[in-house]
Amino acid sequence: MRGRPDMDADTLNELRLTLRRVFAAGADPSVVNKDLADLGWDDARHDDPARTDVAFFEEQGRALAASDVLNTSLCEALGVDVGTGVTIPVRARSGDLAILLTDVIPEKLVVGDLRSAVFLTKSDIDPHDIGPHGIGLLDTTLGARRVVLRADASGRPVDGAAWSAALTAARRSLASELVGVGLEALALAITYVSQRTQFGRPIGSFQAVRHRLAEAHVHLTAAQELVGAAWNSGDADDACLAKAAAGRAADHTMRTAMQVFGAIGLTWEHKLHGYVRRAASLDALAGESGFLEERLGRRLVDGAITP
């Protein structure tokens, strides 16, 4: 991020425009995965993974798209074959596990919670419980499927440092995607208040509306800065802070957008509900904001980290 000369502003902007074209070409995740492969995305991101991953997940969030890129990033963090499937905990206290893959479940799996993980195979999963039902996520278009292990499932433990690195990578990526979801919802709200009139003037000219939108912008900008800091440091606590802040910022933005849209924003016909559901679902993955804030607070009290 900051201080890294690898990718200049023009190249980064062109990358974002390319990603927007990919996401606009089709909502089908399999189409997105194919287009990314045709673009040579895996090779492109290796040159500057910080900027490319932030750009990718922000744009994926803006488009409400789904892909297998997060799973690929987790495989790289774990040092395993990219063809391996990696589960992500859903809501820290629920015990649910989800696999974010838009295609078939692979034969090799890494299954873990917020503490540890093991190497398993597809045969260790109950085939009747591979599906979108029962995950507890509002957004069924995310590409998340519930994973339930067989009672006799057993596997080889994953190195603790590698699993921590994978969770850190997941939180950074999810934080960027949450920011993207929030930015697009905010853009929709700004467009709406610029066009909707009351008392002969756009409602965006009213101070109360402007203040709420400005606060949402501040929350999202702060979250972006924390994501950048997490990439620069590579620290697990920084990644927790970035994801917690992004989750809070996205939630604040969704509440603000629903307020300024009024009744139309609550209808199924309006696109806002897609952003509300996606933000809530992303926040639930790899530790929701409240859980991560509590975790950071305990570490602060214990002296493990300093403010």
Image (tube, helix red, strand yellow):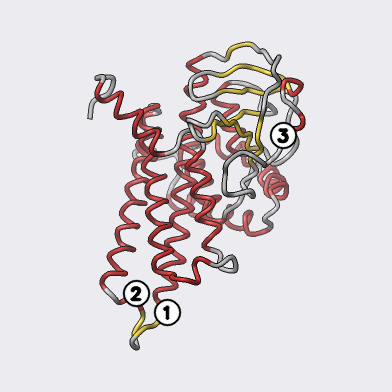
Determine which quarter of the picture holds residue 99: top right
**Closer to viewer: mark 3 or mark 2:** 3
Cα–Cα gap, marks 3 and 1 = 45 Å
Cα–Cα gap, marks 3 and 2 = 46 Å
For badge 1, the amino acid type reads Arg
Q: Determine which residue is flagged by label 1.
A: 196
Determine which quarter of the picture holds residue 135: top right
Q: Residue 101: image x %, image y %?
A: 67, 37
Q: Residue 116: image x %, image y %?
A: 52, 18
Residue 68, above or below 274: above
Sequence-wise first label, 2 or 1: 1
Please say if the residues under marks 3 and 1 sit with CB atoms less than 8 Å apart: no
Callout 1 crowding tier (Cα within 10 Å): few <14, some 14–19, many ≥20: some
Looking at the figure, which quarter contains the N terminus? top left
Q: Residue 303: image x %, image y %?
A: 24, 20
Sequence-wise first label, 3 or 1: 3
Tell me the tag on residue 130: 3
Element under disc 1 = loop
Please say if the residues under marks 2 and 1 sit with CB atoms less than 8 Å apart: yes
For badge 3, the amino acid type reads Ile
Which residue is depicted at the point 34% across and 63% down?
A: 213
Q: Determine which residue is flagged by label 2.
A: 204
Left/right of residue 76 with respect to residue 81 in the rendered view: left
